Image: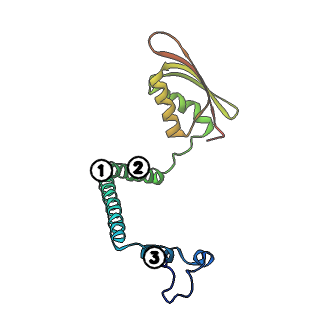
C-alpha cells in the first residue's frame, strides 16, 4: 500500500519540489515546512520543548543579571571613593599649577643658599661652584639628607646629577658627595 507523501500534490500531478529548489529557499521557510510536516502531537511536544529551553535561558539570564547587579552594588562605594580621591588630586594639581615658580637664585649665590638649607636641617655641608655645577660634600643623617634634597628641589629646582653616600658610623650618619647641574634648572 503506497500512500502519497505529504509533499506531493493531491491532484496526482507533480512531485515535491526538487532538492535544488529546496536549497534556494530560505532557512526559515524550510523550518516552517519541516514543522508543518510533523504530526500535531509532535508539534505540541516541539513547542513545549522550545518553551522549556527558552524559559531556562531566561532564568539563567535573570540569575546572571542579579549577580552582576550585586557585584556592581558592592564595587560602587569603592569606585566613588576612588573618584573622590582623583577629584582631590586634580584640585591639588590645579593649585600647584597656579602657584608661581620660585624665583631663581643667581648662580653665584647658590653655594651659600645650599649651605643655609643644609644648616637648617643639621647637615654639615661645604658647597662650591665649579663651572656650571655646584659640588657639595658633607655629612648628616639619611632622613635629614633626603629632606634636604627634597627642599632643594622644591625651592630651587635643583636635582643632583650625582650622589654618593658612605656610612660613617653606627649613629645613622653618612658622608655624602653630590653634584648639582645649574644649567639644567
Quarter in which the C terminus is drawn: top right
Q: Which label was assigned to residue 32?
A: 3
> In whole angstroms, how far apart are the C-alphas of marks 2 and 1?
18 Å
Q: First in sequence, mark 3 or 1: give its number.
A: 3
Residue position marked by numbered label 1 in the rendering: 77
**In which quadrant of the rendered view does residue 105 lie?**
top right
Q: How is the image coloured?
A: rainbow
Distance between the alpha carbons at the discs numbered 3 and 1: 52 Å
- CB atoms of marks 2 and 1 within 8 Å: no
Tally the marks: 3
Residue 119 % position (x, y): 47, 25
Q: Secondary structure at mark 2?
A: helix
Q: CA distance from mark 3 to mark 2?
A: 63 Å
Mark 2 or 1, nearer chain start: 1
- Residue 92, image x, y percentages: 41, 50
- Spot occupied by residue 120 in the image (x, y as percentages of width and height): 44, 28
Q: Which residue is mark 2?
A: 89
Image quadrant assignment for residue 53: bottom left
Q: Residues within 10 Å of mark 2 (few under 14, many from 20)?
A: few
Q: Residue at x 44, y 75 (%)?
A: 37
Up the image or down, 65 lies above or below 164; here it is below
Using the image as rendered, state which of residue 117 and residue 71 is in the foreground: 71
Residue at 47%, 75% (x, y): give it: 1
Which tag is nearer the camera, tag 3 or tag 1? 3
Which comes sooner in the sequence, label 3 or label 2?
3
Callout 1: SS: helix
- The reply to whether dot 3 and dot 1 touch (C-beta < 8 Å) is no
Question: Residue at point 53% right, 46% down?
Answer: 103
Against 63, is 32 above or below?
Answer: below
Q: Position of residue 9 (x, y in %)?
A: 50, 85
Q: Is residue 146 left or right of residue 62?
A: right
In which quadrant of the rendered view does residue 44 lie? Answer: bottom left
Amino acid at each position: 500500500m503506497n500512500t502519497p507523501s505529504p509533499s506531493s500534490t493531491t491532484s496526482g500531478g507533480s512531485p515535491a519540489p526538487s532538492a535544488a529548489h529546496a536549497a534556494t529557499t530560505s532557512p526559515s521557510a524550510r523550518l516552517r515546512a519541516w514543522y508543518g510536516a510533523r504530526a500535531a502531537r509532535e508539534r505540541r511536544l516541539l513547542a513545549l520543548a522550545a518553551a522549556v529551553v527558552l524559559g531556562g535561558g531566561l532564568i539563567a539570564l535573570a540569575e546572571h543579571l542579579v549577580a552582576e547587579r550585586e557585584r556592581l552594588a558592592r564595587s560602587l562605594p569603592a569606585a566613588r571613593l576612588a573618584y573622590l580621591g582623583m577629584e582631590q588630586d586634580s584640585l591639588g594639581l590645579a593649585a600647584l599649577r597656579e602657584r608661581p615658580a620660585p624665583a631663581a637664585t643667581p648662580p653665584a649665590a647658590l653655594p651659600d643658599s645650599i649651605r643655609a638649607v643644609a644648616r637648617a636641617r643639621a647637615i654639615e655641608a661645604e658647597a662650591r661652584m665649579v663651572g656650571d655645577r655646584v659640588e657639595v660634600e658633607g655629612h648628616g643623617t639619611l632622613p635629614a639628607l633626603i629632606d634636604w634634597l627634597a627642599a632643594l628641589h622644591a625651592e630651587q629646582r635643583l636635582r643632583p646629577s650625582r650622589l654618593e653616600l658612605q656610612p660613617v658610623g653606627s649613629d645613622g650618619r653618612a658622608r655624602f658627595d653630590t653634584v648639582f647641574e645649574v644649567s639644567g634648572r
